[in-house]
Image (cartoon, rainbow, N blue to C red):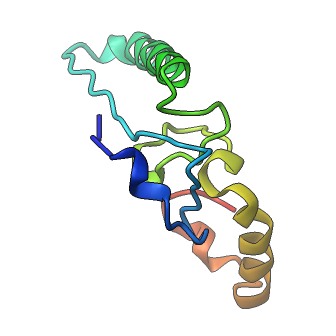
């Protein structure tokens, strides 16, 4: 868990990582270490289940919210882009179309808009 103070979002003006005091979120990551390649599916399932349980507890304790913007570096594969970019998603897609009409950026890794 990243130990953020509750005041960390008090001066947020939005931006690429928009947060507000009413929408707290505490980034966390889970590491699953195992040796057998056949364990991939099981490990992914356990990590997802663990993250979901931890997030529900954080919501219950007022440390997160169901629609909190997630920290991209800690987000799992397949995460809903709205949970990564929030209300900025539509603007980012417009900018991508305007400045990258050939969609060259999609040839790289990372989140696809």
Q: Quadrant of residue 106?
A: bottom right
- Position of residue 11 relative to residue 38, above or below, is below
Identify the image quadrant of the N terminus. Answer: top left
- State the residue at coordinates (71%, 89%): 99
- State the residue at coordinates (80%, 66%): 90
- State the residue at coordinates (60%, 42%): 68
In the rendered image, is residue 102 in sight?
A: no
Identify the image quadrant of the C terminus. Answer: bottom right
Left/right placement of residue 92 relative to residue 109 reads right
- Position of residue 111 relative to residue 54, above or below, is below
Left/right placement of residue 88 relative to residue 44 reads right
**Foreground pick, 112 / 95:** 95
**Foreground pick, 82 / 21:** 21
Left/right placement of residue 46 relative to residue 84 reads left
- Position of residue 101 relative to residue 79, above or below, is below
In the rendered image, is residue 40 in sight?
A: yes
Q: Quadrant of residue 16?
A: bottom right
Q: Quadrant of residue 20?
A: bottom right
User: Which residue is farthest bottom?
Assistant: 99
Q: Position of residue 24 (x, y in %)?
A: 53, 42
Q: Position of residue 3 (x, y in %)?
A: 27, 41
**Foreground pick, 32 / 87:** 87
Q: Position of residue 7 (x, y in %)?
A: 41, 52
- Give the number of callouts: 0
Left/right placement of residue 8 relative to residue 99 reads left
- State the residue at coordinates (41%, 39%): 26
């Amino acid at each position: 868990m990243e130990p953020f103070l509750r005041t960390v979002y008090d001066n947020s003006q939005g931006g690429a990582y928009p947060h507000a005091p009413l929408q707290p979120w505490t980034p966390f990551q889970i590491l699953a270490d195992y040796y057998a390649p056949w364990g991939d599916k099981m490990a992914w399932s356990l990590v997802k289940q663990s993250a979901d349980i931890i997030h529900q507890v954080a919501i219950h304790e007022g440390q997160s919210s169901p629609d909190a913007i997630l920290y991209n570096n800690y987000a799992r594969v397949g995460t809903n882009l709205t949970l990564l970019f929030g209300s900025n998603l539509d603007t980012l897609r417009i900018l991508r179309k305007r400045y990258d009409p050939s969609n060259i950026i999609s040839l790289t890794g990372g989140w696809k808009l």
